[in-house]
Amino acid sequence: MSEFFDKMIDSLMDLLAIDSTQGMPHPLSPFGKGVGECLQYIDELSKKMGFVTHNEEGYYLTADVGEGDSFGILGHVDVVPWDDDWDYSPLGERVGDLIFGRGVLDDKGPMLCCLWATYELLQRGLKPRKKIRFVWGGNEESGWKCIERYMQKDVMPSQGFSPDGDFPVINCEKGLAHWQVKIPAPDGMTSIKGGSRGNIVMAACECTLHGKVDVKPSEKVKVTTVDGNTVLYATGKPAHASTPWQGDNALWHVLDALKSVNSQWAKLDSLLSHNDGSGVGAKLSDDKSGKLTFNVGCVDSEKIDGKTWITLTIDTRIPVTYPIHYVGELISKALGATAELVHFHNPLYVEQDSELVQSLLAVYNEQTGQDAKPIAIGGGTYARALPCGVAFGPIFPDQISTIHQKNEYVDIPTLRKTYEIYKQAIFKLCF
């Protein structure tokens, strides 16, 4: 096993070295040169392993081995952006038993574990009883255009998993909806800007007020005067929007600093500074999937006919028993403006007693000595694209997740354990 695992590490470092954040359309991929280069790398590697591949114009790549009913393993090569304050290279750096790099957990590392684990089983002379299909997408973090293209061109395997969530097994994923809402700016506001993506907790936010305004600075908010205007610059901590409590939203600090300036700022603070949707009357939950989450990931402003408007990009993860449109109605009513649905995924729910869930759960428990049960999350994985699919790893219950965060990393002993679990799962389900 060590030989194959070591080669997996080598290929992981190669893949991490390619910057695959979404970029301008390129001949290699509509999602940017880096995404295209990643898909090319996986294409060449998979062919050397004996897989039959198809690169769909840089949208996605499939790699097949075996015959019969298809079993899918779905993941992605694209990654979210990173800031300049990393302590190690976001393009891959090994420090002792740690590997740093954007995508090492989400999702280059886990997918390569699955690919090399499958190859190891093949090299041992074992023959799959199903057609194993790897689907490598190029646009998971920015809209799922890759999956849309796949649905137009091909047929999804009847069942499978995505190594892009948590262990033990995720059989339930909340509905996912991104909203844009345009509201009038509070009196005296000149501009506001913060955040990079709706699905990341806002790490920084800058707001400018006309003239000199008495605003007290704090540990999180710096207040300066520029050209006679008052400028607030707030810092927070990024985190995945499905777990917003793990981050620190910079917009909240701006609103907290300004809530004493006038009632308009105070109202925005009461509406937006909550992770559970309670500010907009959307504090929802159910027994199957838990509580709704609410994250203002981006804020921007513009002037129209001399009036300043604020545009909010809001990420919500919705309990599976509530319709997505209902949440939009609650947000619209609370903010007094239409919440436009700009991106959504319907929820996923696979019964706990299904063969797929029980098989994966059995492997996980055998490998860890635990008696774990399936879980529900707010994150959205490619498992939703499968007729019967779940998310399976790579984050262990006791593992600190740095997905979408500064210094994303994995330790090699944990990665080795992940590799072994995937190998046994693929063997159990496909060989």
Image (cartoon, helix red, strand yellow):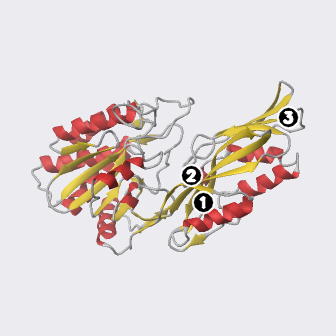
For badge 1, the amino acid type reads Thr
Residue 227, x across and y down, in percent: 83, 24
Vertical arrangement, residue 177 with respect to residue 250, above or below: below
Outermost top residue: 227
Residues at marks 3 and 2, CA–CA distance in whole angstroms: 32 Å
| Tag shown at residue 241 | 2
- Horizontally, residue 182 falls left or right of residue 412, namely right
Q: Earlier in the sequence, mark 1 or mark 3?
A: 3
Q: Quadrant of the C terminus?
A: bottom left
Which of these two is toward me, 47 or 420?
A: 47
Residue 218, x across and y down, in percent: 79, 39
Which residue lies under the disc numbered 3?
210
Disc 1 to disc 2: CB gap under 8 Å = yes
For badge 2, the amino acid type reads Ala
At 26% from the left and 47% from the top, the residue drawn is 62
Outermost front residue: 305
- Could one spot residue 224 in this view of the protein? yes
Q: Secondary structure at mark 1?
A: strand
Which of these two is toward me, 215 or 166?
A: 215
At 67% from the left and 48% from the top, the residue drawn is 312
Residues at marks 1 and 3, CA–CA distance in whole angstroms: 34 Å
| Tag shown at residue 293 | 1
Q: Earlier in the sequence, mark 1 or mark 2?
A: 2
Vertical arrangement, residue 403 with respect to residue 271, above or below: above
